[in-house]
Structure formats: structure tokens, C-alpha cells
Image (cartoon, rainbow, N blue to C red):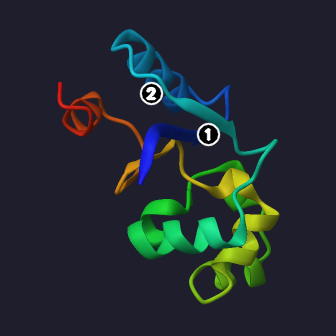
């Protein structure tokens, strides 16, 4: 069980910035992990995929997705999703919030307010 919220993302992502500002404004102490500098492990990605599913975790609108080969795109829909996400961590939809038993992808103020009891 996570005692300190973990927020995974890329610092220059607008949605990540909004989430971080929300957490700071509401004085929610958290740890931030830059996905480019410290990509999640194979086990971590497998866990996220198992909880939220590839439809929610994979950012199919990203520039990175558009640059993938047909084989890599096909692998995302099959058992190769972890391998492709390990190779291209910017394909992970952001931010990913881990806290207690929750894994959340994306950001809305209402959702975060619910998670943190505000």
C-alpha cells in the first residue's frame, strides 16, 4: 500500500502540470517520477496494464504512437504491450497516479478530490 502518492509523467506535459499544481495547491505531499528519466519496470507496467488496461494506459494520440511501425502498433494490442512501453515510455498516458490501492491515468480535479477526500 502506497503511503505517499506517486505521480508519474513528463514535466513539460500540460496535464501533468495541472495535476502537480492541484496536488501542491491542496497540500498533498507526493513524489514525482519523470518517465523519461526513470521508466517503470516491466513488472510495474504489467501491473498498470492489469489494473487499467491498455485502452486507458496507452496514449494513441501521441506523436510517439504515430511514429511507431505497424509491427509495434500491433504488439500494443497483443501481449507485446509491455515491451513497446518499455522501449517508448512516452506512450504512457499521463499522469499516472499511484496511491493506496488506486492506479489512475489522466487528471481531473474531481477525480483527485475524490481520491484525497476533499
Res. 44 image quadrant: bottom right
- The image's mark for residue 9 is 1
Res. 65 image quadrant: bottom right
Residue at (31, 34) in percent of width and height: 108
Could you say whether the residue bearing mark 2 is in a helix, strand or loop?
A: helix
Q: Work out which quarter of the rendered image holds the C terminus and state it.
A: top left
Q: Work out which quarter of the rendered image holds the N terminus and state it.
A: bottom left
Disc 2: which residue: 19
Of the numbered discs 2 and 1, the one sitting upstream in the chain is 1
Residue at (72, 64) in percent of width and height: 41
Between 21 and 62, the residue placed more toward the observer is 21
Residue 96 spot, x, y in % from top left: 50, 47
| Extreme-top residue of the structure | 25
Crowdedness near tag 1: few (<14), some (14–19) or many (≥20) residues, C-alpha within 10 Å: many
Crowdedness near tag 2: few (<14), some (14–19) or many (≥20) residues, C-alpha within 10 Å: many
65 up-or-down from 13: above or below: below
Could you say whether the residue bearing mark 1 is in a helix, strand or loop?
A: strand
105 up-or-down from 108: above or below: below
Amino acid at each position: 500500500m502506497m503511503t505517499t502518492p506517486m505521480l508519474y509523467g513528463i514535466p513539460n506535459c500540460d496535464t501533468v502540470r495541472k495535476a502537480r499544481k492541484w496536488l501542491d495547491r491542496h497540500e498533498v505531499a507526493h513524489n514525482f517520477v519523470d518517465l523519461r528519466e526513470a521508466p517503470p519496470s516491466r513488472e510495474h507496467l504489467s501491473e498498470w496494464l492489469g489494473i487499467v488496461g491498455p485502452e486507458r494506459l496507452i496514449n494513441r494520440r501521441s506523436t510517439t504512437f504515430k511514429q511507431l511501425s505497424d509491427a509495434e502498433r500491433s504488439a500494443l494490442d497483443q501481449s507485446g504491450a509491455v515491451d513497446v512501453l518499455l522501449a517508448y515510455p512516452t506512450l504512457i498516458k499521463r499522469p499516472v497516479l499511484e496511491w493506496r490501492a488506486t492506479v489512475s491515468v489522466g487528471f481531473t480535479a474531481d477525480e483527485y478530490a475524490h481520491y484525497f477526500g476533499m
